[in-house]
Image: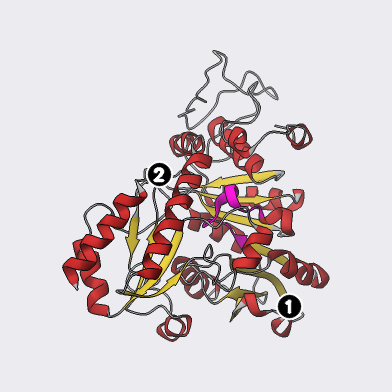
C-alpha cells in the first residue's frame, strides 16, 4: 500500500490493527488475509508475471504483514524475518570490517551474543556503554551506528530517543532502536528521529506464544533495498504461515497491550509494597528515573517488570512454585511469564557486564499478561507465603 495513501487515513491505532487497505484482498474478498503457502509462482508469459516469483524473495502474505507493521509504526517500509534475531543479524550485515558501533550495555542477551561471536569475528568493532547517559565521548571517525533498547531488557533503563537522534544525525550515524518492549502501541521511535526500528515479532506484535518472527522498520528507500537484498540472499524472511499468525495476532495488539499494562500497574504497586521484594523496576512508577522521559516520548509504559527478591534461594523457590503463570523464557503474550535472566535470557552476557548492570541471582523478570490482575496478585501472595 502506498505510504502517502496510508498517511491520509486519520484513524486510531486500534483501527490500524485491523489492517491497512481493505482493497488488498484475494480474488474471493476474504476478510482474513489468505496464507499463500507456496514456494513458487508461475509466470503467465516471458516478461509477464504476477509480481511474485519465489517465496524466499516475496510472498503476498508476508507483504501484507509488512504493510500492516509499517502502518503501525508510521513508516514507509517494514521487512518481516523468521525471528527477531534474524532481523538483528540482517541489520548488522549493513556494516563492514572496521566499522564501529556504540551499543547499550543493557541489551537482550541474544543480541550481545550475536555481536560478540559473529559480528566481532567479521571485523565490526563495538563500544559498550550506558547510552542513556550520553554517547559523544565514544564517537570515532569510523562509528556507523548507535544500537539500543528503551526500556532496556531487563534493567528498564530509559533513553531519550529524540535527544540521542539529534546527536547521531549531527555526526551522520544511524540510530537503531529495538522497540520490542513497548511495541508500536506505546512508542514510535521513527517519529522521534530513529533511523531503524527493530521488533521481535514473536513478542507483543504476534502476542500469543505460538509463532516466531522479527521486523525491521524504516523510512529510507536505499536502506530498505539493501536489507531486502540481504533477506533474499540469506533466506531469512518470514514464512507464509508465520506471517498469517502474526497478522491475526496484530488484530488484538491494542486491546492486549492496554490490558497487560493495566495489570502491570497494579502488580508493580503490589510488588513495591511486598516485604519479600527489595526493588521494583517498572518505568510506570513515578520514582523510576526514566518516568518523565517515558511520559514525553511514549504513550504508555508497557507491561514488563523486573524485580529483586531478598535472596537467590528465594528467587529460585518462587520459580519452582508458580502455577497460575509460567516459568518460561520469552515475553509479550497473553499469558504471564516469569523469567530468571541470570540463567535464561542473559546467560550469554559476560559475567562482569551482568554484574555491572545489576543482573544478579536475585533478579526476576515478569512479562505481565491479560489474566485478571487480582488473580495474579493472589498467586504472588500464595507463592511468597509458601516459600518464605
Name the disc covering residue 2, or none: none
The residue indicated by pointer 2 is 211
**Is residue 140 one of those drawn in magenta?**
no
Residue plotted at (76% across, 51% down): 222
Residue at the spot 29% in from the left edge and 50% down from the top edge: 375
Towards the viewer: 232 or 347: 347
Q: How is the image coloured?
A: secondary structure
Q: Which of the numbered marks, if any, corresponds to residue 142?
A: 1
- Which badge, 2 or 1, is on the more N-terminal residue? 1
Q: Is residue 87 above or below residue 6?
A: below
**141, above or below 234, in the image:** below
In the image, the segment drawn in magenta is 177-188
Secondary structure of residue under mark 2: loop
Of badges 2 and 1, nearer the viewer stands 2
In this rendering, would 186 be left or right of 297? left
Residue 289, given in percent of the width and then of the height, sits at 58, 74
Alpha carbon separation for disc pair 2 and 1: 38 Å
Amino acid at each position: 500500500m502506498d505510504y502517502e495513501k496510508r498517511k491520509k487515513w486519520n484513524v486510531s491505532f486500534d483501527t490500524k490493527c485491523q489492517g491497512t487497505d481493505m482493497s488488498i484482498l484475494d480474488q474471493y474478498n476474504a476478510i482474513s488475509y489468505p496464507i499463500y503457502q507456496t514456494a513458487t509462482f508461475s509466470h503467465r508469459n516471458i516478461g509477464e508475471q504476477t509480481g511474485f516469483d519465489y517465496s524466499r524473495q516475496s510472498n503476498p502474505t508476508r507483504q501484507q504483514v509488512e504493510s500492516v507493521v509499517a502502518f503501525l509504526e508510521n513508516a514507509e517500509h517494514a521487512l518481516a524475518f523468521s525471528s527477531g534475531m534474524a532481523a538483528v543479524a540482517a541489520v548488522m550485515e549493513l556494516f563492514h570490517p572496521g566499522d564501529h558501533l556504540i551499543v547499550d550495555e543493557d541489551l537482550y542477551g541474544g543480541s550481545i551474543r550475536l555481536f560478540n561471536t559473529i559480528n566481532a569475528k567479521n571485523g565490526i568493532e563495538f563500544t559498550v556503554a550506558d547510552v542513556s547517559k550520553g554517547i559523544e565521548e565514544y564517537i570515532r571517525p569510523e562509528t556507523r551506528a548507535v544500537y539500543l533498547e528503551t526500556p532496556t531488557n531487563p534493567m528498564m533503563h530509559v533513553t531519550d530517543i529524540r535527544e540521542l537522534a539529534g546527536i547521531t544525525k549531527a555526526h551522520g550515524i544511524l540510530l537503531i532502536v529495538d522497540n520490542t518492549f513497548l511495541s508500536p502501541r506505546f512508542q514510535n521511535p521513527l517519529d522521534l528521529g530513529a533511523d531503524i526500528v527493530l521488533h521481535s515479532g514473536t513478542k507483543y506484535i504476534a502476542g500469543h506464544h505460538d509463532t516466531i518472527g522479527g521486523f525491521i522498520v524504516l523510512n529510507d528507500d536505499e536502506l530498505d533495498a539493501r536489507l531486502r537484498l540481504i533477506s533474499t540472499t540469506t533466506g531469512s524472511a518470514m514464512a507464509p504461515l508465520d506471517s498469517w499468525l502474526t497478522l491475526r495476532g496484530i488484530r488484538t495488539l491494542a486491546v492486549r497491550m492496554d490490558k497487560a499494562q493495566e495489570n502491570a500497574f497494579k502488580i508493580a504497586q503490589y510488588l513495591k509494597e511486598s516485604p519479600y521484594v527489595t526493588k521494583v523496576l517498572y518505568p510506570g512508577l513515578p520514582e523510576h528515573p526514566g518516568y518523565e522521559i517515558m511520559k514525553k516520548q511514549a504513550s504508555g509504559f508497557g507491561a514488563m517488570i523486573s524485580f529483586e527478591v531478598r535472596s537467590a534461594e528465594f528467587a529460585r523457590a518462587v520459580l519452582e512454585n508458580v502455577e497460575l503463570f509460567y516459568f518460561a523464557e520469552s515475553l509479550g503474550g497473553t499469558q504471564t511469564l516469569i523469567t530468571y535472566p541470570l540463567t535464561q535470557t542473559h546467560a550469554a552476557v559476560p559475567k562482569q557486564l551482568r554484574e555491572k548492570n545489576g543482573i544478579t541471582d536475585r533478579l526476576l523478570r515478569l512479562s505481565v499478561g491479560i489474566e485478571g490482575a487480582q488473580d495474579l496478585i493472589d498467586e504472588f501472595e500464595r507463592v511468597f507465603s509458601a516459600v518464605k
